[in-house]
Amino acid sequence: MNAKSVILGGAGVVGLVAFLLLTPAIEVLLLWGLGGLLLLVGLGYLQTYYTVSRSEPADLRTVNEASSAIEIAGTVQPHAETVRSPFTDTECLCCEWRVVRGEPGVTEEQRQDDRQLRRGTESDTIVHIRRRTASIVASGEDVNPFVVETDTGSVLVEPEGAQRELSESAWLRFDPGESTPEEIADFLRSQTELEPDDEQVRVYSEHRIDPGDAVHVYGPVREAGASFDLPSGTKAVIGFESPDEGTFVLGEDSFSDLVDQIRSDNRNRFVVTTGSEIEAERTLLKNGLLWSAVGLAFAGLGLFLL
């Protein structure tokens, strides 16, 4: 389980604890602990932002296996297979999809506001459609390796385990009474056993990497140089050797394991962002400031309760 998802779940636990009115001392400790974790995540993003903002994309002609993390920016091309996105049947290389359901009765005037839906992280994430509560009831992803062509060569990116910041590529909304297209309904049944509910507002969104898209990648060099394992025409491979190794398991691992994973994520940051280098820097800065601010807010609330 992603460390950030665990922390977000922890925020809900803190709210429940406050509701149950446990002793102030326990509440303070929980707030400080959660605040510290959030701040640690935020500082990791800010550190990566500082590194990326002060560097230039790597010259792939000089990259070798001694290189650690590198930054590249270029155009995406397929490596081997492509996939079809679930809601628009678009050829792509990576796709993250979500299904949001909300209360009926949202007006036409509110339709545009729905586009302000913030990206969630888990199926129980709560978002708001203009004072109306909606929930992400299903989500998934399909991730394939892809090649990034730059001015100095090509590199293979294996994005499994990376933090992916993908722009919204498709946004489909159906009001109460509108039928869900059969191809979407069939896909949801096959993937989630989720039945169509035509009595609610439904929003189907896709965040994709398509062939020809501009991307920015900051991540670890796994292979480079004259390796016989490199795909033809590429000068390096960016990605984790074992993407799932060391992943935190809720209910099995300890609090210290969670802290260790956050520190590991901070040391081995792997980010794939659609768009330019400037957009990637803005995303890192935004994430860093947001996580840090929320962490400080929780810690400050703990001080207030003393």
Image (tube, rainbow, N blue to C red):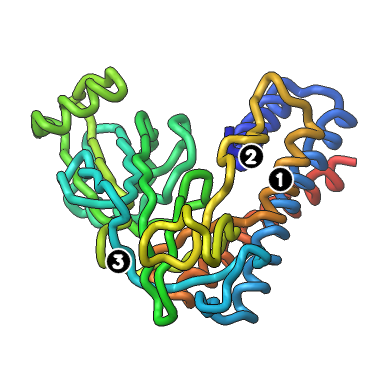
Q: Earlier in the sequence, mark 2 or mark 3?
A: 2
Relative to 108, 151 lies left or right: right
Location of mark 3 (residue): 213
- Residue under pointer 2: 3
For label 2, the SS is helix
- Identify the amino acid type marked 3: Asp
Q: Quadrant of residue 199?
A: top left
Disc with the residue nearer the chain's start (2 vs 1): 2
**Count of picture labels:** 3
Quarter the N terminus occupies = top right
Q: Quadrant of the C terminus?
A: top right
Residue 54 visible? The answer is: yes
Who's the residue at 24% across and 27% down the image? 188
- Quarter assignment of residue 194: top left
Label number found at residue 60:
none
Q: Return the mark for residue 262.
A: 1
Please report the residue visible at 37 percent of the width from the left and 67 percent of the height from the top: 233
Q: Residue at x 70, y 66 (%)?
A: 47
Looking at the rendered structure, the secondary structure element under dot 3 is: loop
The kind of residue on which mark 2 rests is Ala
| Front position in the image: 151 or 163 | 151
Contact (CB < 8 A) between labels 2 and 3? no
Nearer to me, 38 or 277: 277
Cα distance between the residues tagged 1 and 3: 30 Å
Q: Is residue 114 visible?
A: no
Label 1 SS: helix
Contact check, label 2 and label 1, Cβ < 8 Å: yes
Is 187 or 292 nearer to us in this picture?
187
Of the numbered discs 1 and 3, the one sitting upstream in the chain is 3
Q: CA distance from mark 2 to mark 1?
A: 6 Å
Disc 3 residue crowd, few under 14, some 14–19, many 20+, Cα 10 Å = some
Q: Position of residue 104 (x, y in %)?
A: 23, 33
